[in-house]
Image (tube, coloured by chain):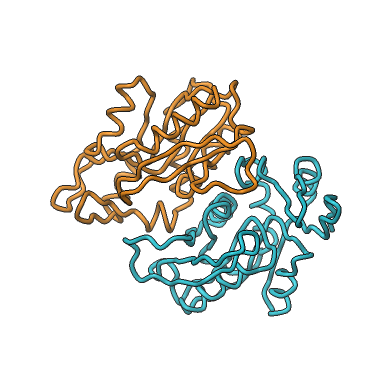
Chain colours: A cyan, B orange
């Protein structure tokens, strides 16, 4: 998606260790018009796919997910990273965070992930795919079907996208980063 | 806002201790069409107010905030509840959570909250107003101006709205809960 790629080149900042900061338009300060354009493009990429529910993970997945849900008119569920004491029928999975070098849990209420659901997962970043694996686990536990995964930005060099596609998943990413070597952003 | 009030009566669930669960349409599973309608109503309530930035707190404030930002075409910033190691120029404030009986920090990068900003704060719940006080502190630290606070649901019996209004703040809430006594939802 050209608008996003241009914006990454213009406003994205690269740090040692393969870190791309897009916190001025995606995951701390957000550009809502760009967010809606990205949601429109994600909807186009999954045209023809039956979707009954959008699933994301708090916090930075929520903005693109609610926009996609709005365009498709389907409910949006966000998995939580802590287990609320008041949550019933909880489905839980573990995710290893490469960036933070620790494991965290994601959880979602079974009430909102039903066996008949056709789930589209939406998130801001696809890197090594650990969060994606946790989400696949949650959807499997619910007995629902994961029909696709849509991301704003994919870091191809961290191989999560490769693994998910090899497993037969329909994965769409609006901008794919080939490399951040020498703190230079190379887009596919 | 009638649509929201009707939905609270229909789908909200009340638990002992003044707890209202709206996790099937607002803060776990979200209804994106209702979310957009609520954002439209918040925009109406602040018509005539100059707004250059929307501020919210992760996670459940993000969905209404991004919708309001989309309608007003202004950037949306979400304060984070943990301090990311990569955040620069951080503004930090402490918030006491009555529900969880503990203090947590909220932080925002000074890069995205500038002295010239006219800030509208958006969140899902207004209860005792502790999060609101933390936000006022962050905006003051930035030297910006807080021009209003808009909430989806206010719990009048927890008095945060009263305190903020007495302090001269323009506060708007789309549904106001008078009481949850005996697990009965009484709306104003």
Tell which of A168 and A81 is nearer to you: A81
Q: Position of residue A23 (x, y in %)?
A: 66, 44
Q: Position of residue B135 (x, y in %)?
A: 45, 33
Quadrant of the rendered structure where residue B110 is?
A: top right
Residue at image location 50% in from the left, 59% down from the top: A74
Q: Position of residue B183 (x, y in %)?
A: 17, 53
Tell which of B46 and B59 is nearer to you: B59
Residue at image location 69% in from the left, 63% down from the top: A127
Q: Position of residue A112 (x, y in %)?
A: 42, 66
Q: Is residue B163 left or right of residue B53?
A: left
Quadrant of the rendered structure where residue A164 is?
A: bottom right
How many marks overall? 0
Tell which of A174 and A79 is nearer to you: A79
In this view, the residue farthest toward the left is B182
Tell which of A32 and A85 is nearer to you: A85
Residue A32 appears in view: no
Q: Is residue B56 left or right of residue B13?
A: right
Q: Is residue B132 above or below residue B24?
A: above
Q: Is residue A89 above or below residue A3?
A: below
Residue A63 appears in view: yes
Q: Is residue A145 left or right of residue A14?
A: left
Q: Quadrant of the C terminus of chain A?
A: bottom right
């Amino acid at each position: 998606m050209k608008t996003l790629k241009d914006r990454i080149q213009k406003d994205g900042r690269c740090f040692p260790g393969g870190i791309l900061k897009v916190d001025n338009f995606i995951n701390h300060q957000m550009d809502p018009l760009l967010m809606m354009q990205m949601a429109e493009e994600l909807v186009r990429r999954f045209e023809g796919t039956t979707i009954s529910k959008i699933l994301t993970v708090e916090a930075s997945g929520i903005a693109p997910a609610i926009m996609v849900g709005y365009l498709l008119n389907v409910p949006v569920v966000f998995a939580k990273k802590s287990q609320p004491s008041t949550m019933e029928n909880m489905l839980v999975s573990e995710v290893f965070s490469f960036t933070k070098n620790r494991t965290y849990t994601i959880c979602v209420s079974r009430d909102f992930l039903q066996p008949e659901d056709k789930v589209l997962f939406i998130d801001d970043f696809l890197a090594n795919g650990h969060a994606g694996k946790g989400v696949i686990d949650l959807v499997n536990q619910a007995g629902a079907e994961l029909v696709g995964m849509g991301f704003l930005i994919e870091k191809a060099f961290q191989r999560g996208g490769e693994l998910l596609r090899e497993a037969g998943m329909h994965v769409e990413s609006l901008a794919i980063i080939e490399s951040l070597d020498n703190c230079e952003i190379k887009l596919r």
